[in-house]
Amino acid sequence: MLAALGMGVNLLNNAFGGSAVEDNPLSFFDGKLTLDVQDRVRWEMRENNFDFNSSRNVSTDDGWLLQRFRLGVRYEPESWLRFYAQGQDTREIWGKREKVPFVLGAEGDDPFDLRQAYVELGNPAQFPVTLKVGRQELAYGDERLIGVSDWNNFTRTFDAVKIRWVDEPCALTLDAFAAHVVTIAATGPSENRDLNFNGPNWHDTLAGLYASSTWLPFQTTEAYFIYRNKTENGPVYTDDLGNIARPYDIRQEVYTMGLRAKSTPGKLSGFDYEAEGAYQFGRDAGRIGTAYPNATDTMLKHEAFAAMVRGGYTWENAPLKPRLGMEYDIASGDSDPNDSKDESFLNLFPTNHKFYGYMDLFAWKNVHDLCLNLRCNTAANVAVQLDGHAFWLYSNEDAWYRANAVTQVRPVNAAARDANQFAGTELDLTLSYAPFRWLKLQGGYSHFFAGQYLADTQTATAGADDADFGYLQATITF
């Protein structure tokens, strides 16, 4: 039986990722029709991630299995014409929490749904302008403001129109886009078990200009101007116990402008760097007193900022090619919940899991984050990374926000305003292994050391204990 299993693995390796066959077996008609398939399974275990209280065993102190299946088809009848459609089915299996999307961090169930469906016109080799219309991914920069959020089972897509202009002599790309985010249709404990197709939120408009240039050979330089107009505070998701989640942020009409620079790999003799800064202005339904969004739905003047800088060095000639890096992230928080201005940075549509700790306890919002990391390639297709974060709140007058940039860890009350701003430290250990081109294995363990802020704000149910998170994940992609 073991011999048969080994033979099967070798056949898959030869067919889909080995050296024997390099052509895509899911490509037909001279490459005009191509299929893609992905299946991802992840087992997670969490302890104290929500209440930081070891004396209570709540529904979020548990383990669960997350499964995601995708099937896509691409048809390119001409070099200037492409069609693409992709379906996705996501499930959450086992676990004590109810399977309502977003509530208590749940992924929930979203039966087979339309994730992408677009047509793309143009060929940059023949003409500098291309047009992409339909349901699609939007991802810019490192995805700190607009991204796919791939760690999440659902991920993120938009019903969008995107025009791209490419100036090859100047090494410049300019995107202009207008979009509505696709939201999960279900908002209750039973609705998401049926076929209820996700649709765009017509009350949440995103538009912008994003320019990227490699004219300087040692870095990519980017500039952007983004507009978001969300006219409702919903949708709100709820379970049978009355727990609610508001994952798509508050009412806002906000403009975000920013600059980003990132070094080109291999150009600086082992050194690398990245820096980004963003400034926001407009209006939003931010906090008045303790309510968020404010109870009167009043629109406040909005003015906020965020920035990051990181750098590192890779010993290219060392046996493990280690990279040692350091990063600092900052995002403003509101300084006074009773005035007419909100200074809490609005994180738009980010992929926050990649940056502010793998336990997803923080966002680019009301935070200082100092990070040290070490990455080593221990063998072919094997990598180990250790990240250490130290977190402080930017303002005690604002909340500590989780990775969705909406959910609060603790309410903003008298104790929170007087608390120490040090939230805690997090260690993340990650191991990844890609034995074949079509298979990626990943595992990780994270521990959060509770800081003084949690001790100063603890109650009978909300504690100040450390928290743990572990996972194993396998992804098969054809």
Image (cartoon, rainbow, N blue to C red):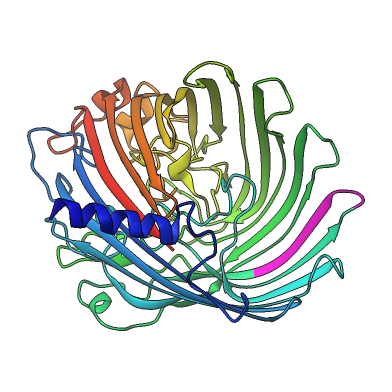
The answer to whether residue 106 of the structure is visible from this angle is no
- Residue 153: name its quadrant: bottom left
Q: Which of 452 and 181 is in front in this view?
A: 181
Q: Is residue 381 magenta?
A: no
Viewport quadrant of the C terminus = bottom left
- Direction right: furthest residue: 169
For the image, the number of numbered tags is 0
The answer to whether residue 74 of the structure is visible from this angle is yes
- Residue 113: name its quadrant: bottom left
Magenta part mainly helix, strand or loop?
Answer: strand
368 versus 341 height, above or below = above
Q: Which of 142 and 431 is in front in this view?
A: 431
- Percent coordinates x, y for residue 265 in the rendering: 67, 33
Viewport quadrant of the N terminus = bottom left
Taking the image as shown, residue 138 lies to the left or right of residue 448, namely right
Taking the image as shown, residue 39 lies to the left or right of residue 220, namely left
Q: Does the magenta stretch include residue 174?
A: yes
- Percent coordinates x, y for residue 221 in the rendering: 77, 40
129 versus 19 height, above or below = below
- Percent coordinates x, y for residue 442 in the rendering: 33, 42
338 versus 124 height, above or below = above
- Percent coordinates x, y for residue 280 in the rendering: 66, 46
Q: Which residue is drawn at 24% across and 24% down?
A: 455
Q: Which of 212 and 68 is in front in this view?
A: 68
Q: Residue at x 85, y 49 (%)?
A: 171
Taking the image as shown, residue 234 lies to the left or right of residue 192, namely right
Q: Residue at x 53, y 42 (%)?
A: 344
Magenta residues (range): 169-178
Q: Which of 58 and 7 is in front in this view?
A: 7
